[in-house]
Amino acid sequence: MQRPTARRTTARAGALALALAGALTLAACSSGGSGGSGDSGGSGGAPAATGAAATGMGASGVEVDEHTGALGTYLTDSKGNTLYLFVADPSGKSTCSGSCAAAWPPLTATGDVKAGSGVDAAKLTTVARSDGGKQVAYDGHPLYYFVKDTSAGATTGQGVDGFGALWWVVAPSGSAITATSGSGGSSPSPTDDSGYNY
């Protein structure tokens, strides 16, 4: 029986080292994962704030649903991440970009927008954003996530006064829900978001 020469042993060791390096590189790439964020994002949305936001952003198609909680029945994405309207937006136009859109990621879509149960499909449209994307709108209101909503159904953006105006959850009728507690008829007590670190 012939013993392997030093050259063969070295070649085998080199091949093994290359295979091991390749496996480690592949493992490192796959562990980097694409993780969720919001919002987002891009679109098709959100929560874990990052998760919430990311859900809506950049999705080819999205679905708008409804959720019932302490504030009543309001719009969410298909994963239950809350959607908001911005009082400063004129009908059919978004005025939130830059640092505003980082805090309030828009719900965007490049494909179909579907209405879930309880949502009026006739009120669902898209509006052009300044960056060329298409933002989902409901009854003329562009829809957004809030980066501080860290779980499905969270409504920490309700009544926030930020970037020049108030933010409210949206009822299936298309109206803003302006209650800030579960009483339904409470007066809003908006909070200022100027101290948030986004």
Image (cartoon, grey):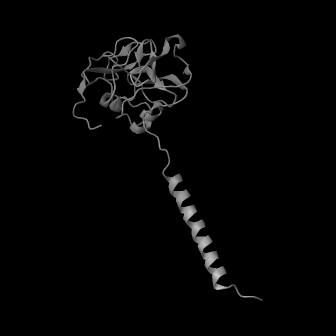
Position of residue 183 measured from the top left corner of the image (x, y, whole percent) = 33, 20
Residue shown at the point (39%, 31%) measured from the top left: 154
Viewer-proximal residue, 18 or 106?
18
Number of disc labels? 0
Q: Could you say where residue 100 lies in the image, as x and y percent from the top left?
A: 31, 28
Q: Judge from the rendering whether residue 80 lies leftward or rightward of residue 71; answer left or right.
A: right
Q: Residue at x 52, y 13 (%)?
A: 120
Whether residue 82 is visible, yes or no, is: yes
* Residue 115 can be seen in this image: no
Q: Quadrant of residue 27?
A: bottom right
Residue at image position (49%, 15%) is 125
Q: Can you tell which quarter of the image residue 104 is in?
A: top left
46 relative to 89 in the view: left or right: right
Q: Residue furthest right?
A: 1
Q: Residue 29, position in %: x, y?
A: 51, 53
Question: In what quadrant of the picture does the N terminus appear?
Answer: bottom right
Q: In which quadrant is the C terminus drawn?
A: top left
Q: Is 36 positioned to the left or the right of 180 in the image?
A: right
Image location of residue 4, percent across then percent down: 69, 84
Q: Quadrant of residue 24?
A: bottom right
Q: Is residue 193 left or right of residue 54?
A: left
